[in-house]
Every structure is written in structure tokens, then in C-alpha cells.
């Protein structure tokens, strides 16, 4: 007899509490990325060919309770040097097929900031277009607000605080466009001499610039944004600022990093209470009491063009119960119907022809373990219909003795899209 228990869902969200909540952003690939610094200086060819956002680490800490906007700090390493990044709140429209859709949040963000029409004819949009077509099948609108920005240092790092009480249109340098009366304040930025910096292959003397956020017309002026009271479910983006540049390596406001986010306005003084898990049925005689495995975070990404090889990644963290060790842990993976069994070595890694799984080691005093599942090209299917959508799905179980921990992941992404859609469910079964 097997008993199935739904795991406590702690995945795909970050909630704000009094002590601050860390939001770990994940790097994306496949966008029309910029490879010039804020002044337009091109990076070295070796840097262009080797840089990847999944190698960066960015944590946004939200730590200001009682506000009508988000505020906190950014700690980043591994980003592009001397580079400007936008901080955005972006909605999850249900018409896009997202499993964690929230149309109310999406609409609120759009009316506070801007609209992007995903389909038909992807382009910037406006309130009138949204109101006229939001209920028409085939129309998908994504609302977002550019709430803040920051600039990295010469190593691509940043440790800054931000006040997200803005609704900017885009960023400018003062040598490009004069600051308007309603625009945000000018932030002075100095780029040091590039001599000896491996990201550059040309030595350029130190340069100074002024950056500011342009006011989004018809919206509240920078520094006065007040978000309506309520619960919000959306995504936090780091978006590259391209400065309306053109030509090779100029970029086009590509999303660099992303994380799902939930929060309340006013920002909470205590963490929201998570839903209670289903009651645990009595343990049959002779069996081990149930020990739930919590999926703390989950992220999926499809890469469908790089090097003409299709790949997919599923990344996240697991909260392991006491007594469950990684060494010699048997992992069964089912990818598109093809079952594979992996046995983790002493470092928590295993691989087969089409799967590679790596589990990190928990920090001292913690049972939280990061994991990364890599799925090769044979697991990706391109349908013959006109949707041109690739999908990947994997059923994963972690097995130790009489206890199995099982979950399934399914991700899909349209060709040409920068982002995929992820759905996830996890269960624990006891024999």
C-alpha cells in the first residue's frame, strides 16, 4: 500500500517579512543582449564569447515594512561591468498560459507603468489598446513597472539600496537627452580607466556620466509611486538598459535575470502565513513516519538555439529531512517517457546520456540543498503544428530505502520567446 502526500508548496514565490526576504534571481539566456558599457565602449571579444548570465549571482533583499512600494538592497556579482540594469515588476497574464497567473496584479502593474503586447504583433502598447482588446482571444498583454535601476562597478558587482517608488519609462544619459522637469534625479557615474580590465581589450581613460530615469507619461512622477493595497503575484526582472543604442552588440532591453515574487501592500510586518499542508494519515504499523520534502525554490529554462543544440535546465533547492544523505542516493528520472536511473556519487552528482543531475551540499546547520537537472536535446520535442512550441517534461524521484520523494516538471516555450512557462507539482510517497 502506498500513501501519497502533497508537499508543502514553498516554491515559485518570495514573500516579504519584517526581517527582510531574499529574492534569488536566476540568469537567463538567448536574449538580444548588450555587450557595451553605459558609455558605449565595446567589451573584449573573449568576454563576448564567454559571458553568461546564469553564472551571475543576484540577491534582492526586501526589508522595508509598512510601505506602499518595494524598497531594499541589491547584492550582485558576476554581472557585466560598468553596466546599467533596470529593476522591474512584471505581471503574469493568464492568457500567456502561466501556471501562477494573476490577472489582477498584471492589470495593476500595467496601469501603474507600461504595457507590452505579447500577441498579436509583439510591441509596446498602451492603456487604450489593453482596454479595447484584453478580453479578445489571442490578445496577451503584460503589464510592468520600472521601479528602480543601478550600475555595476568595474568587476560587474554591485551593493546598493533602492527605493522602488518610481514609474520610469526608460533610462538615459544626460549627454543623450536633457533631463525633463518630471524626470528622476541624475545619478553621477564614473567608469574607471579600463587598462588591465579583462572585460576590455582597449585601454580607455576614466569617463563620467549622469544617468536618470525618464518619467513615464501620464503616470505618477518619480519618487511618488503608491501601489494599491492588496496582494501581488508577479515576477522581478533585471533588464539590461540599452540606451537606445543601435548596431552590433547594442542590445534591445533584454531580460537578464528573473525571479517569481509575491508581496503585500502595505509591505508586511510579519511573513504571510503559508497554507497548511493536508493532514498526514496515520502511519501503518512497521512503516517509517512520513517526513515531507519541501521544494524551496524551482526555476526552469529552455535554450533552443545556442550552438544549434537544444537543452533544458531545471534548477532549485530542496529542503531535505533529517537522516536523508546525498551519497549513494538513488535518483530515478523519467524524461519524455524514457526512464533512467542515476546513483549520486559522494559529491552528489550523476549523469546518463541525456540527463545530468547535481545536488549541492547543505550549509552547516542547514538541510537546504541546491539542485540542477540538465536535460539533453533528445528530451525536447518540436511539434509539427504551427504553434512552434517546444516542451520538456521530467518526472523525478529521490529514493532512499523504503521512502520515495517524487515530483514532476513540465516547461514549454514558444520559438523566439525569451521566457518559458513552468508548471510543477511534487509528492512524497511511502511504500
Image (cartoon, helix red, strand yellow):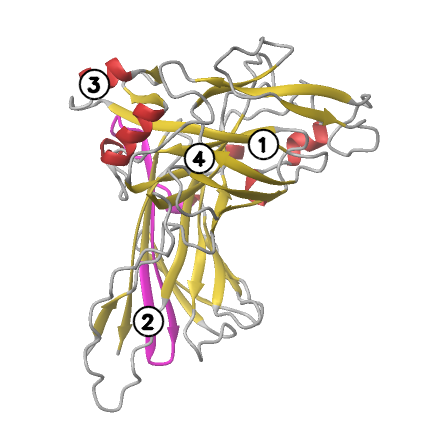
> Which residue is under mark 3?
131
Q: Earlier in the sequence, mark 4 or mark 1?
A: 1
Element type at marker 1? Answer: strand
Q: Where is residue 341 in the image (x, y as percent from the top left)?
A: 41, 65
Q: Earlier in the sequence, mark 3 or mark 4?
A: 3
Element type at marker 4? Answer: loop
Element type at marker 2? Answer: loop
Q: Residues within 10 Å of mark 3 (few under 14, many from 20)?
A: few
Q: Which of marks 3 and 2 is nearer the N terminus?
A: 3
Q: Which of marks 2 and 1 is nearer the N terminus?
A: 1
* Residues at marks 2 and 4, CA–CA distance in whole angstroms: 35 Å
Stretch in magenta:
378-407
Q: Earlier in the sequence, mark 2 or mark 4?
A: 2
Res 150 label: 1
Residue 147 in magenta stretch: no
Residue under the image location 60 percent in, 20 percent down:
186
Residue 400 in magenta stretch: yes
Residue under the image location 22 percent in, 75 percent down:
280
Q: Which residue lies furthest to the bottom in this view?
A: 286
Res 292 label: 2
Q: Where is residue 351 in the image (x, y as percent from the top left)?
A: 50, 60
* Residues at marks 4 and 1, CA–CA distance in whole angstroms: 30 Å
Q: In this view, does 26 lie above or below 182?
A: below
* Residues at marks 3 and 1, CA–CA distance in whole angstroms: 33 Å
* Residues at marks 3 and 4, CA–CA distance in whole angstroms: 34 Å
Residue under the image location 47 percent in, 52 percent down:
20
Q: Which of marks 3 and 1 is nearer the N terminus?
A: 3
Q: Find residue 237 and report its image quarter.
A: top left
Res 234 label: none
Q: Is any atom of residue 41 visible in this view?
A: no
Element type at marker 3? Answer: helix
Amino acid at each position: 500500500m502506498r500513501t501519497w502526500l502533497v508537499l508543502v508548496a514553498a516554491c515559485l514565490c518570495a514573500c516579504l517579512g519584517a526581517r527582510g526576504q531574499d529574492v534569488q534571481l536566476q540568469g537567463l539566456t538567448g536574449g538580444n543582449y548588450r555587450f557595451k558599457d553605459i558609455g558605449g565602449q565595446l567589451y573584449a571579444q573573449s568576454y563576448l564569447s564567454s559571458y553568461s548570465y546564469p553564472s551571475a549571482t543576484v540577491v534582492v533583499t526586501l526589508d522595508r515594512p509598512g510601505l506602499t512600494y518595494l524598497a531594499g538592497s541589491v547584492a550582485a556579482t558576476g554581472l557585466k561591468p560598468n553596466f546599467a540594469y533596470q529593476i522591474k515588476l512584471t505581471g503574469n497574464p493568464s492568457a500567456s498560459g502561466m501556471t501562477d497567473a494573476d490577472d489582477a496584479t498584471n492589470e495593476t502593474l500595467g496601469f501603474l507603468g507600461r504595457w507590452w503586447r505579447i500577441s498579436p504583433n509583439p510591441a509596446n502598447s498602451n492603456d487604450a489598446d489593453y482596454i479595447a482588446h484584453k478580453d479578445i482571444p489571442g490578445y496577451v498583454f503584460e503589464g510592468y513597472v520600472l521601479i528602480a535601476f543601478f550600475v555595476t562597478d568595474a568587476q560587474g558587482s554591485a551593493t546598493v539600496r533602492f527605493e522602488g517608488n518610481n514609474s520610469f519609462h526608460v533610462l538615459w544619459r544626460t549627454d543623450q537627452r536633457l533631463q525633463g522637469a518630471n524626470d528622476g534625479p541624475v545619478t553621477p557615474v564614473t567608469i574607471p580607466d579600463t587598462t588591465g580590465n579583462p572585460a576590455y581589450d582597449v585601454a580607455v581613460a576614466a569617463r563620467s556620466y549622469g544617468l536618470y530615469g525618464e518619467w513615464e507619461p501620464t503616470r505618477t512622477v518619480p519618487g511618488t509611486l503608491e501601489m494599491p493595497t492588496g496582494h501581488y503575484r508577479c515576477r522581478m526582472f533585471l533588464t539590461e538598459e540599452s540606451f537606445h543604442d543601435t548596431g552590433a552588440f547594442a542590445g534591445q532591453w533584454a531580460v537578464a535575470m528573473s525571479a517569481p515574487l509575491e508581496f503585500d501592500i502595505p509591505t508586511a510586518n510579519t511573513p504571510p502565513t503559508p497554507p497548511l499542508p493536508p493532514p498526514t494519515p496515520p502511519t501503518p504499523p512497521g512503516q517509517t513516519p512520513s517526513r515531507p520534502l519541501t521544494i524551496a525554490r524551482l526555476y526552469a529554462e529552455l535554450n533552443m538555439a545556442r550552438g544549434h543544440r537544444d537543452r533544458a535546465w531545471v534548477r532549485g533547492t530542496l529542503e531535505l529531512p533529517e537522516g536523508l544523505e546525498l551519497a549513494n542516493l538513488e535518483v530515478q528520472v523519467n524524461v519524455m517517457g524514457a526512464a533512467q536511473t542515476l546513483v549520486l556519487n559522494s559529491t552528489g552528482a550523476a549523469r546518463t546520456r541525456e540527463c545530468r543531475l547535481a545536488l549541492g551540499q547543505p550549509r552547516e546547520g542547514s538541510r537546504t540543498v541546491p539542485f540542477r537537472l540538465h536535460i539533453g536535446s533528445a528530451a525536447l520535442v518540436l511539434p509539427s503544428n504551427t504553434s512552434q512550441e517546444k516542451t520538456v517534461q521530467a518526472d523525478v524521484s529521490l529514493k532512499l530505502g523504503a521512502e520515495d520523494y517524487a515530483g514532476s516538471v513540465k516547461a514549454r516555450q514558444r520559438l523566439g520567446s525569451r521566457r518559458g512557462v513552468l508548471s510543477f507539482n511534487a509528492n512524497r510517497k511511502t511504500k
